Amino acid sequence: MTQISKFLFFLLLIGAAVFAGEKSDKKSKADSKPAIDTTVISWYPYDQGLKLAKEAGKHIMVDFTAKWCGYCKKMDKETFSNAEVIKFVNSNFVCIKVDGDSQNELDIEGYKITEANLARSEYRVTGYPTFWFLKSTSERIGPASGYRPSDQFLDLLYFVKDDLYEKMSFQDYMSKGGRNSKSQN
């Protein structure tokens, strides 16, 4: 073999090795589980969120909001942009956002209702923001109203996620130290 032929053969071998390495790297990335997004909360429409929660076996957090609501905007800007809140809700809840003024029609297993009527008639929302927590089966756990800073909201999220509402009131949970308590028996 001439020097040029050897050089071209060497380049061909390097190119094949690089291509095989890229293909192998892509396969391992595709096989791995996607990371939990910590940059933004994954919000779903009500009807889609119910289906997803049932499939995933996760609790549901419904954020009833309105475009004109100042405290709703504050929740979005401060609490729902907090990395710890984002990671926790994306890992443990299916998050649903419902605009209490919207005429957008939802289809809940054949039952059609607007977002506004869902908020007013079905959930009796009278102020914003109001958060309803549900089991993965869509069974209602209970509401929480008003703006909550990240730390207080995380306490509420842990209370629901760990099913502590079945054992005690939220007030009792907080009097025992909330999520920072060593035991919540």
Image (cartoon, helix red, strand yellow):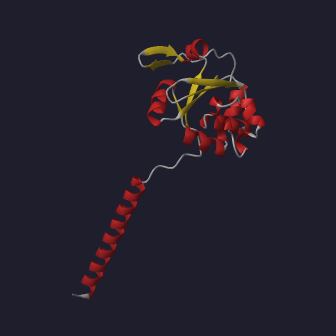
The quarter of the image holding the C terminus is: top right
Pick the front one: 184 or 41: 184
Establish if 28 lies above or below 40: below
State the residue lying farthest toward the front. Answer: 185
Residue in the picture at 50% in, 14% down:
113
Q: Is residue 34 left or right of residue 127?
A: left
Residue 171, given in percent of the width and then of the height, sits at: 75, 30
* Residue 109 seen in the current view: yes
Residue at 61% of width from left, 37% of height from top? 162
Asked whether, in this view, residue 88 is left or right of residue 14, the answer is right
**Left or right relative to 61: residue 109:** left
The reply, left or right, for residue 152 in relation to residue 45 is right
User: Going by the picture, which residue comes out furthest to the right?
Assistant: 175
Q: Quadrant of the N terminus?
A: bottom left
Does the rendering let one see residue 130?
Answer: no
- In the rendered image, residue 129, in percent from the top left (x then y), is placed at 68, 25
Q: Residue at x 63, y 24 (%)?
A: 142
Q: Residue furthest left?
A: 1
Percent of width and height locating residue 50: 49, 27
- Quarter location, residue 181: top right
Image quadrant of residue 7? bottom left
Q: Residue 36 in the image: x percent, y percent?
A: 53, 47
Q: How many marks?
A: 0
Who's the residue at 66% across and 35% down the image? 159
Residue situated in front as seen by the camera: 22 or 130? 130
